[in-house]
Image (cartoon, rainbow, N blue to C red):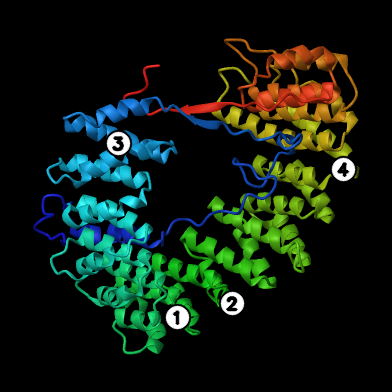
Amino acid sequence: MVCTQKACKKNEPRQHPWRQGAVGLAILLLAAGRVFAAPPGPPLLPGFTPVDRGFGNIMWRDPALPSVKPVQKYNLSAQSNWRLALQQPDSLTRCRTCQALAESARAGMPGLGQFLPQLLAIVRNNKTDAVLRRAAVEAIIAMNASSAAGTLFSADSHGDWHVALLCDAALARWHFQPALRLWLARVNGAATNSVVRLSAVQALGKLGDKQAVSTLRRAALTPRRNLQVRLAALQSLHELHAAGMAVLAAHVVGLAGVQALGKVQLEHVAVGTALLAVTALDASSRPDGAQDLVVWAGSSNTAIAALAMQGLLRAHSPLAGKAAPALAHSPDSVLRRLAAEAFLQQANAQSVAELSKLLGDPRRFVRWYARHALSTLGGGRLRPQVLEVVGRMLVKGNALARRQAALVAGRLNFTTLQRQLLHVLRYDPSLLVRIGAAAAFRRLQLAGMLPSLLAYAQETAEVSASLPTSVHATTASLQRQSDLGGQLSQLFQLFGAMRYAPAQPLLMRLIPKHSPYSGTARTAAIWALGKINRGRYNAGLARQLKGRLDDLSILDPELESVRIMSAEVLGRMGSKAALATLRSYYISTDTSRLCLACRWAIGRITGKEPPLPNTSVVYSNQFLPPTR
């Protein structure tokens, strides 16, 4: 049975004409896997943090504490309640039970196969309430019970469009071949509901049967078809590896031949039709397809240009570099980000120059990727060119570019730029740029610069201490305190990594809870003290850090990060006097970083670490929970 407009009239959502424009186009792109969102930023390189991918904090990687994941357990005693609930006469109770079974199946609860006969009985009963029937179908699909494919196929054939949408995806995923004829009939049916037709088109692509190619071609080439259905048909043809995709694209835009596709005036083509053509060209493998994509990448429509550029990048075409310079100056940030990726693929001197311009981009995911690309290129034969542009941007770039250039200099170990970086650290008007320079020095670890950096850290600490920290402090004052703390944190981590003992008096000033410094700087200072005093017991320091670890004041508790570092430092120094305190915070069911830090410290002091915390999370659905 084919769902018709008349049969689904009550259930079909009202279609608004404008939804077939921009919003409808976004939905169809989502269905086709062509979402025009901002491309992802650079990968999580070592040292990247969620706050700013580029600074890094070695204090959170040394020591390397294990990652403990809770063990998922299930309370199976509720299943007896669900079994009884499915036998109740009222539909509401049974419907909620089906929903509980679906949720539990998605959570991985075992032993749900025992409910399959009852669920199948609900689906097979044509007199069952429609809502209950859908809930039972959803529960069966959540259990991934492919043995019930025949029953779901029967429900798909005779049910409403809600059931069809549920069953189509499951049957296609299970490669249920008997559904092929039903889906072909729905695609060809003149009165088929557009939502059901779209589901059938997508299912045909996932089924993987070549018999659907001719039907899908007709669906893609029929002008009166819904735009979402046409694009879904084109995507399904791509999944079936159909031949002649480029010719199909030429017919879609109404051109006489494929060669004319690159000569069409982009502004004279409807956006939806152009997107169909670009999608087909992207999927085609003909040699001149990349030339056409270069033309489409120059479209004034950013959606078309982005899709074409993504096609060039996926194909690793050298022609992507041809379109990239123009896109790098686009007002659209997504296109600028794609241009940066093209420059990275191109990997030549021009790419380095263009990427340096993107270091100061107003959108951070663009400048982050430009920094990542320059760091990648600087690790190879283009290192001299990257060194030159980084040195130039440190002097002539805007504040955003100077900050990213400093981070590149640190990551690539450009020691020849140490004087420029020191000038930036001392005199740059932007505190955020100074944080970048401090992070660069932390990575460079230049012994000859330590006295100068310590002098600067002392000056910065004095400025930070002079700022108001009470409740009357302004927002600007608090922000400045945070920025200064970021600089001190990077410099303190440098002192700790190089075990620079002259910095210890300054670091000791940051231990007290109410010292006038940011929490970030205090955390780094304590970590650095642990590195400097590694293997050397300092009674006064141990006494202070034990107090910090044990400070759980109800109204004014110590920062969690400070307590974590205090535990680690006590372990580094081998403080046996703090062993009882450390053991009191090691709980066998606690997977927090504080507990893991205490465990590590106990191991350093005693030579034997306690077992890893073993905690479990019990999943229990809230409908008819167990009574015991």
Look at the numbered discs 4 and 1 and tell me whether their residues touch, using CB distance below 8 Å: no
Tell whether 516 sits left or right of 191: right
Instruction: Work out whether mark 4 precedes mark 1 in sequence or the reverse, and give the earlier one.
Output: 1
Instruction: Work out whether mark 4 precedes mark 2 in sequence or the reverse, and give the earlier one.
Output: 2
Q: Amino acid at mark 2?
A: Pro
4 or 1: mark nearer the eye: 1
2 or 3: mark nearer the eye: 3
Instruction: Work out whether mark 3 precedes mark 1 in sequence or the reverse, and give the earlier one.
Output: 3
Q: Please state the horizontal and vertical placement of residue 392, each as a whole percent of the image.
A: 73, 60
Q: Residue at x 31, y 29 (%)?
A: 82
Q: Quadrant of the C terminus?
A: top left
State the mark number for residue 318.
2
Q: Amino acid at mark 1?
A: Asp
Mark 4 → mark 1, Cα distance in angstroms? 55 Å
Q: Residue at x 28, y 51 (%)?
A: 166
Q: Residue at x 46, y 77 (%)?
A: 293
The secondary element bearing badge 4 is classed as: helix
Q: Amino acid at mark 3?
A: Gln
Residue that badge 1 annotates: 292
Q: Residue at x 30, y 30 (%)?
A: 83
Q: Please state the horizontal and vertical placement of residue 401, each as a whole percent of the image.
A: 64, 54
Q: Quadrant of the N terminus?
A: bottom left
- Is residue 466 something that shows in the picture? no
Image vertical order of residue 303 relative to residue 450, above or below: below
Residue that badge 4 annotates: 449
The secondary element bearing badge 3 is classed as: helix
Residue that badge 3 annotates: 99
Q: Please state the horizontal and vertical placement of residue 322, each as a whole percent of the image.
A: 56, 76
